Amino acid sequence: MEKLSDEALDLLFREARTHNAWLNRTISDDTLRQLYDLTKWGPTSANTGPARFVFIRSAKAKERLRPTLSPGNVVKTMSAPVTVIIAYDLKFYDKLPKLFPNNPAMRDGVANTPQLIEATAKRNSSLQGAYLILAARALGLDCGPMSGFDNAKVDEEFFSAGKCEECEQEFFPEGHVKSNFLCNIGYGDRPKLSPRNPRLEFTEACTLL
């Protein structure tokens, strides 16, 4: 595979920023489906794919999210076209017969090793959240990932019994989907960006052995 152009690398990394202010532009459901269809190809342990994504688009759904947010995250989240709850399913192993068919024993092996379940789900859903950010940037969207919210309140509001009457998909098994982090997505208002903060240099963060 040939490497990406400098323009593509700028889009994904060097010129990409975390946005807090948004243009008044909607994101279509088709674009959200494209976003997931790119995200899903990122690697996870044994192809477990434990992340579950809630795309919060409507004003009604945003109001459900509002009480869970830290004060500093309210305005930017309520004004974002879409806020994604990146969550993880603690019963991800039930999908392993489909996702890892070359090892039929994998499902029961994971299910019977409880000490691995949450660590696997958290680690790999975090990876999938990062893939989501890169996929969004590749589609011309901007992102604002954040952790300033009450996980327990989000889980109660969006993943507990009777909370998903209007959901279109099947992935909300009650009680074992948990929130990891949030990510606003949309078209960022670049003039409102603050100066970019520095990053560690290679010699500060890396070692060659």
Image (tube, rainbow, N blue to C red):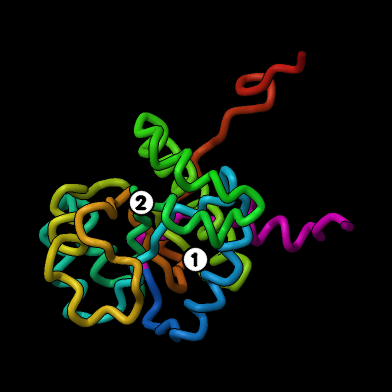
Residue numbers of the magenta segment: 1-21
Q: Is residue 86 left or right of residue 96?
A: left
What residue sits right under mark 1 in the picture? 142
In the foreground, 46 or 7: 46
Q: Earlier in the sequence, mark 1 or mark 2?
A: 2
Residue 182 vs residue 194: left or right? left
Residue 12: give x, y in percent of width and height.
Answer: 64, 57
- Residue 38, picture quadrant: bottom right
Residue assigned mark 2: 91
Q: Residues within 10 Å of mark 2 (few under 14, many from 20)?
A: some
Residue 115 against residue 180 in the figure, above or below: above
The residue that appears at 81% across and 60% down in the rendered structure is 5
Q: Residue flagged by tag 1: what amino acid is it?
A: Asp
Using the image, determine if residue 200 lies above or below residue 11: above
Is there a contact, CB below 8 Å, between mark 1 and mark 2? no
Q: Residue at x 56, y 55 (%)?
A: 131
Q: Is 39 a magenta residue? A: no
Task: Look at discs 1 and 2 and give the one toward the viewer.
Answer: 2
Q: Quadrant of the N terminus?
A: bottom right
Who is closer to the viewer here, 39 or 75? 39
Residue type at mark 2?
Lys
Indicate the secondary structure of the residue bearing disc 1.
strand
Residue 9 lies in the magenta-colored region? yes
The residue located at (54%, 66%) in the rendering is 136
Q: Residue at x 44, y 52 (%)?
A: 50
State the separation of the CA atoms marked 1 and 2.
31 Å
The relative height of residue 150 versus residue 156 in the rendered view (above or below) is above
Q: Residue furthest top?
A: 209
In x, y percent, where is residue 69? 18, 55
Residue 109 picture location, percent across and down: 48, 38
